[in-house]
Image: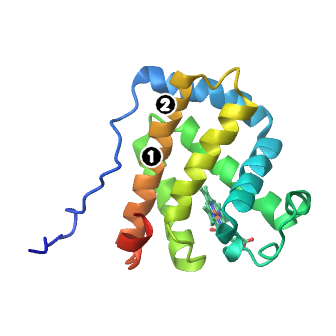
Amino acid sequence: MERMQGEGEVDHLERPSPLTDKERVMIQDSWAKVYENCDDAGVAILVRLFVNFPSSKQYFRDFKHIEEPEELERSAQLRKHAHRVMNAINTLVESLDNSEKVASVLKVVGKAHALRHKVEPVYFKILSGVILEVLGEAFSEVVTVEVAAAWTKLLATVYCRITAVYEEVGWTTLSTSTG
Ligand code: HEM
C-alpha cells in the first residue's frame, strides 16, 4: 500500500550524522587552503562538472554548446558561477556552528535553483561528488582520507537540505530525479 507522507514526514535517507567538533575543524582547516586558491579551484570544479556531466550545462545559456575544456574555462558565466559557489561554500564553512545561518543560505540557494533556474536537484548531488574529487586531487596534502570523509558528510547535509527546500517549494520530479 502506498505510504502517505504528510508535511514534515518526508524521509531524508541520505541525512548524515551531525559533524563532530573534530570534523568541523578538519573541514575549516582544509578549506582555508582551498579558499586561498578560490578562483582556480572553483573553475576546476565546475569545468570538471560540465565536461564529465555535459547535461549539467543545459541551464547555462552562454556555454551550453561548448565542449572544449579550455573554452569552458574562459566562459565569464562559468567563472561567475564558480565564484558564487565558492563564496557560498565559504559562508557555510564559516558558519558550521550556526545552523540557522546554514539553513538560511541553503534556503536561498535551493529556492533560486528550483524556482528561477529550474535545476534538477540531482545535479547538486553530482556536484558534491565532483567537489570531493577535485579537492582530493588538487589538495591531496590536506585532503586526507579522514578529511574527505568529513567533507562527504558536510556535502551530504547540503544536498539533504537543498532537496528539502525543493520539496517545500513544490518541486514535483524529485522522486524520479534523485534515484
Ligand atoms: C553548492 C552548489 C551551488 C551553489 C552554492 C550555487 C550558487 C549560485 C548562486 C549564488 C547563483 C546566483 C544567484 C542566483 O541567481 O540564484 C547561482 C546561479 C545559477 N546557478 Fe548555481 N549554485 C550551485 C549549484 C548549481 C548547479 C549544480 C547548477 C546546475 C547544474 C546551477 C545552476 C545555476 C544557474 C543556471 C544559475 C544562473 C546563472 C546565470 O544567471 O548566469 N547551480 N548559483
Asked if labels 1 and 2 touch by Cβ distance under 8 angstroms, the answer is no
- Could you say where residue 87 lies in the image, as x and y percent from the top left? 68, 48
Residue at 60% from the left image edge and 40% from the top image edge: 132
Query: What scheme was used to colour the molecule?
Result: rainbow
- Residue 165 in which image quadrant: bottom left
Q: Is residue 66 left or right of residue 33?
A: right
Which amino acid type is marked by label 2? Ala
Residue at 69% x, 56% y: name it.
Answer: 49
The amino acid pointed to by label 1 is: Ala
Q: CA distance from mark 2 to mark 1?
A: 10 Å
Q: Secondary structure at mark 2?
A: helix
Res. 59 image quadrant: bottom right
CA neighbours of label 1 inside 10 A, class few (<14), some (14 to 19), many (20+): many
Residue 90 image position (x, y, % from top left) = 63, 42
Numbered mark located on residue 93 in the image: none
Q: Is residue 99 left or right of residue 71?
A: left
| Label 2 neighbour load within 10 Å: few <14, some 14-19, many 20+ | many
Q: Circle 1 sits in a helix, a strand or a loop, which is it?
A: helix
Q: Position of residue 122 (x, y in %)?
A: 50, 63
* Quadrant placement of the C terminus: bottom left
Quadrant location, ligand no. 1: bottom right
Q: Residue at x 55, y 30 (%)?
A: 148
Question: Image point 69% across, 48% down: which residue?
Answer: 86
Q: Which residue is mark 1?
A: 156
Q: Is residue 68 above or below residue 172?
A: above
| Furthest residue in direction left, as rendered | 1
Q: Which residue is mark 2?
A: 150
Task: Judge by depth and name the residue closer to the eye, 35 or 160.
Answer: 160
